[in-house]
Amino acid sequence: MADRKILVVDDEIHIVQVIAIKLRNNGFEVLTAENGAQALDIAKKHKPDLVITDYQMPVMTGIEFIENLRQIADTAETPVIMLTARGFAIDQERKNELDIATFLSKPFSPREVLQCVEDVLQQVSA
């Protein structure tokens, strides 16, 4: 799993920092963005192996970001983990349409994030 690039997108800086520290401490290269528009530019340039994005963000929502990510040939297949507030719901059809690997509800522990990332990357490489 080492040397895998992960893009973390959230407008809450402390969440980005917590996730980035946990992933870096476990051998991942971490790219960060504060909104979907910034993340899209980073994704185009760096082609991450996985994206973790918040749902609710200014400038561009997580859904809009994923829709745009899927339009770029180099990132169309990039696995996505979506961070959501408790009680958030998206229907299965929309989840499949956007090809969201899984959801992670806030609040979460850094260990949960790491496990989720490892699980998704393992599924993709299987």
Image: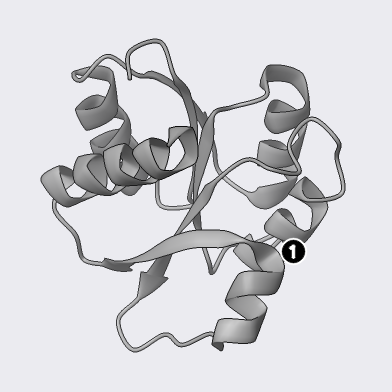
As drawn, 121 above or below 10: above
Residue 64 or 4: which is nearer the viewer? 4
Residue at (28% x, 19% y) in the render = 24
Q: Is residue 76 left or right of residue 6?
A: right
Residue at (19% x, 18% y) in the render = 25
As drawn, 38 above or below 92: above
- Name the quadrant of the C terminus: top left
Q: How is the image coloured?
A: one colour
- Name the quadrant of the N terminus: top left
Residue 105 or 122: which is nearer the viewer? 122
Residue 67 or 121: which is nearer the viewer? 121
Residue bearing mark 1: 64
Residue at (24% x, 38% y) in the render = 18
Where residue 56 sits: x, y (%)?
A: 54, 69
As drawn, 4 above or below 6: above
Where residue 98 sits: x, y (%)?
A: 68, 65
Where residue 102 sits: x, y (%)?
A: 42, 62
Residue situated furthest top in the rendering: 3
Q: Please tell me in which quadrant of the rendered image residue 21 appears.
A: top left
Where residue 101 sits: x, y (%)?
A: 48, 58
Residue 41 or 92: which is nearer the viewer? 92
As drawn, 117 above or below 56: above
Q: Amino acid at mark 1?
A: Glu
Instruction: Give the structural element (helix, strand or loop) at label 1.
Output: helix
Residue at (81% x, 53% y) in the render = 68
Q: Is residue 88 left or right of residue 42?
A: left
Q: Please tell me in which quadrant of the rendered image residue 26 appears.
A: top left
Q: Please tell me in which quadrant of the rendered image residue 83 appears.
A: bottom left
> Is disc 1 surrounded by few (<14), some (14 to 19) or many (20+) residues within 10 Å?
some
